Each structure stands twice: as structure tokens, then as C-alpha cells.
Amino acid sequence: MDKSKFIDLENIKIDIEVIRSIPEKIAVDNSIIAFKEEEGELYIAVSSELKQSVIEKLKFITNKRLKLFYADKFKIANLINTYYCKYSVQMALENTRSGRNSNVLKSEIKSVQYSENMNDVPIVKTVNYIINAAICKQASDIHIEPFESYVVVRFRIDGIMHEFIKIPRDIYSHLSTRIKIMSGINITEKRMPQDGKIQYMYNKDKYDFRVSTLPVFFGEKIVIRILHRSDKLNNLKLLGFKDNDINIIHSMVNRPCGLILITGPTGSGKTTTVYSILNSMNKNKINITSIEDPVEYMIENVNQVNVNLKLGFNFPKGLRSILRQDPDVIMVGEIRDEETAKIAIRAAITGHLVISTLHTNGALESISRLLDMGVKDYFIRDALIGVISQRLIRKICPYCKKEYSPLLTEREELKVNDGLKLYKGTGCLRCENTGYKDRSVVYEIVDFKGIKKNIGDKFEWCNFRNKFKSIDDYCKDLIKSGVTTYEEFLKLKF
């Protein structure tokens, strides 16, 4: 097939009857979608070259000539989810409620196994469809929440929760059992929180899921964190870092020893930034070891260690063990306490490059945090190379982006003239009617070379704010360039 025949599915009006001319299983298995029918020809979008046997099968099923076009695989997956999955979830739920497969379900619970031949069981299909829909919508988490008369499934997309579907209360036990089986969780334990993992394949991509259960008043709430090894893990620029700042980060990472901190609140993308930094290093020339709670993504040529609090193997014990393993670079998932902080600082002083995360609101506040943990100021002066503090902000949806004239308060805050136009998303199907699609990092980077001598018990970080570009300043630039909105900027202040 000629690869120049590429089609953008976002700009095409699609007839649902045309889509349904291809059975769902064939569409999902081969990542294809029919989008147009004209003069006996069926137009099909594909993400990769189709096998001749699949083409012949499609010709037989549809009884039409085929015209194939290349399209983005995520756009194909999103259409499959939109036009097949939600309908299929409803059908699978109805079949599950009918009880026609109760014997199969019971045998599955007894075997406590996840095998491919179970994929046609309605409850299995229901769970798979929910997961597939979350992946298609690029959700970071799936929340399954039981209430008195129904169960709500919600997705967290770009940091915001969206309701996907309501599930009848009477089949929730089957649904939770299925997820527990997939994640290796004890299906009989309902009174205590549990954690598990799932490895999942969708559209030829591998995903890792972290599963957490929590007993609530009306049952067990289940949260599934979706972890996908994307190109962003290998590229700081895709995360939103500017070229000049990437060079600063690389210059810090290339130093032989010292401490680099990535700071921000929970959900600000710290771990993704740390992994991207590790991926940018020449791992063949150095020994990199990490200690994490838990390991979120597997990184090639990095020795990754999971803490195990049940066995007493915590960050301090893990760090001491790693120091006996001849490391060049140590990644500490998070500095949580005084003991971990002191060991990490000593490791940085004694010839190791240490990269870690810390919960603070800004780059300079990290010094105050370390001092509060009991780390001596002279150790911080000797060890600290630099700090990256970051947040995540939502980007304006490119499909419904419209310009507008800013209000007086916006102009004054942003310090722009009357003629400048700003942008907002009006909301569309592609962005779940939010006006936003995807997220970008906003950040501040402080190289401590110039201010180390000022670090002490009475360190006042506010005196150094004018020495670097702040998160607020960076976000304002993104507003002026039409990447994000004034409303997203206001959220940074809280």
C-alpha cells in the first residue's frame, strides 16, 4: 500500500453503519476502522500493513472492494472505543446480569487464572472494554466506585475526573473479582486494602497497571493506575522542556557527583521527569541503580530496586545496600524522612550522583525542607547541584481553540497590551467538552553554583527569586503563545 495515502480521521464525518460493516473483533485485533462507503468501495483506515489473509477475509465479510489508507493508530483506537466499546460494555453487562455464564465465572474464580480463552465471557469482556476505553482516552487512572444502588466508573484524563459509565450494583462483585484475578489479589479478602499488578496488551502495545483496592462503606473501591512506556519517557522536549533548559539539565546530570532534586506536589510529573533524565544518560558507561516505591517503569540497563516495607526493607536500608554495589548514579524515588535525606546527601558528597524527588512547592523551598529534616547547611552546600520544580498544566484543545480579547484583570496580570489576543477551547467531542487536551510541564530550574554560599539556617529563598525564571513566569509565556489558558495559571496559585 502506498504510504502517501494518509488520512486524518479527525476531520472526517463517519457513518456509524459503515463502521459496523467490520466486526468488532477484526477491527480491534488489526487496528482498523471503516470510515466511508462509495460506489461499492469500502474505505478503511489502517495503522500498519495488513496481511493478505486479513484483506481477503474483509472482502468476503463486507462483499465490497477495499480502499486502504494509513491513519494514526491512536485515532483509530479512539474511534473503535467510541463506536464499538461503549455499546459492547452495555451488551456485556446485560449478558452478565442474565446469568447465562455464571458457571464459567465460577470456574474462573476457582482457577484464579487469567487466560486468553476466557476473553469471550461477558464479565471478562466488560473489564477489557473499560480498560481499552481508558487507554483510548489516554486516561492515567481508572476509578471504580461502589455506591448504594450503582457503581460509577470514572477516568482521570489530564488530571480531571470524567464519568465513563454506571454499572448495576448486582454485578459489581463479579467485576471486582475479575480485576482481582487479573492483578493477583486475594479475591476473598474484602476488609483490608490490597495492591496488585497487571500486565496488559492493547493494540500491540504493552501496559503495566498498578491496582489498589480500598474498603469503603458500600464495598471495595478499585483504582487502576495506567503506566504506558511512551516516547515522552525518552525525551524531555516532549514533556515541555525548552532546549536551553534541557542543556542546563544535561550539564547538571553530567557532573560526576552531587545531588539533583525534582520537586513538586503529588501528580506533578516528577517521576516521569526523573525517568526521562535517566534515559538521557549513557547507561553503557556507568552503573545506575534506583530504589523506588514502587518501580513504575522498567528502564533498560538500570538496576531498579523495590522497597518492601512489610519486610522492613525501606529507603534507608536500600540506600545503604546500594552504596555497597559500586554505583555511579543513584536514583532515590523520594526523600521522605531525615534518615533518607542524610544518607542521600552523604552519598552525593562521597562521589556519587544522586537524583531524587522531594515534596515542595518551589525549587528554593527544597533547601528549607532539607534543613527542616535536620540536614546540616554545610552538607547541603557541598552536595546540592540543582533543583527542578514543576507542575502540570492542561493544554488548549487544538480542535476547538478560539481566540478572545482578555479581560482587564488578565491583561494586568500578564502585563500585555490591549491588542493581544488570548485563546480558549470551546469544548468538543475530542476533548470531552473540556476545552483542553493533553498536558505540558511548567517548571523552574535553579543551578545552585551561584548561591551555595548563601545556604544556611536562616536561608531566605525569597531573596533569590529574581535570579531565575519562575513557574509563574513560564506559565504566562505559555498563555501568551496560545498553549494554555489564564484559568490554568490561576490554579498554580493554590
Image (cartoon, rainbow, N blue to C red):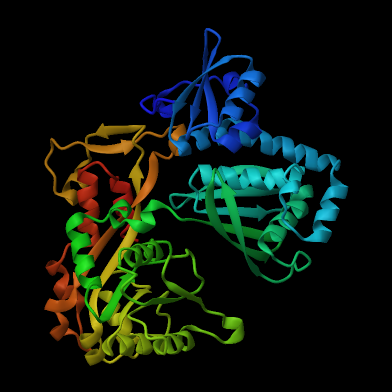
Q: Give the residue drawn at x 33%, y 36%.
A: 398
Q: Position of residue 344 (x, y in %)?
A: 35, 85
Q: Is residue 319 left or right of residue 212?
A: left
Q: Give the residue drawn at x 71%, y 62%.
A: 217
Q: Position of residue 60 (x, y in %)?
A: 65, 19
Viewer-closest of 443 and 279: 279
Q: Quadrant of the N terminus?
A: top left
> Can I make out residue 163 in this image?
no
Q: Position of residue 416 (x, y in %)?
A: 13, 45
Q: Give the residue drawn at x 65%, y 59%.
A: 221
Q: Is residue 462 left or right of residue 177?
A: left
Task: Locate residue 111: give its quadrant.
Answer: bottom right
Q: Position of residue 461 (x, y in %)?
A: 20, 76
Task: Locate residue 219: give its quadrant.
Answer: bottom right
Q: Residue furthest right?
A: 103
> Can I make out residue 52 in this image?
yes
Q: Quadrant of the C terminus?
A: bottom left
Could you tell me how many numbered marks the image carries?
Answer: 0
Viewer-closest of 175 and 405: 175
Viewer-closest of 151 and 86: 86
Q: Is residue 8 left or right of residue 31?
A: left
Q: Give the residue drawn at x 42%, y 29%.
A: 10
Q: Residue furthest front?
A: 52
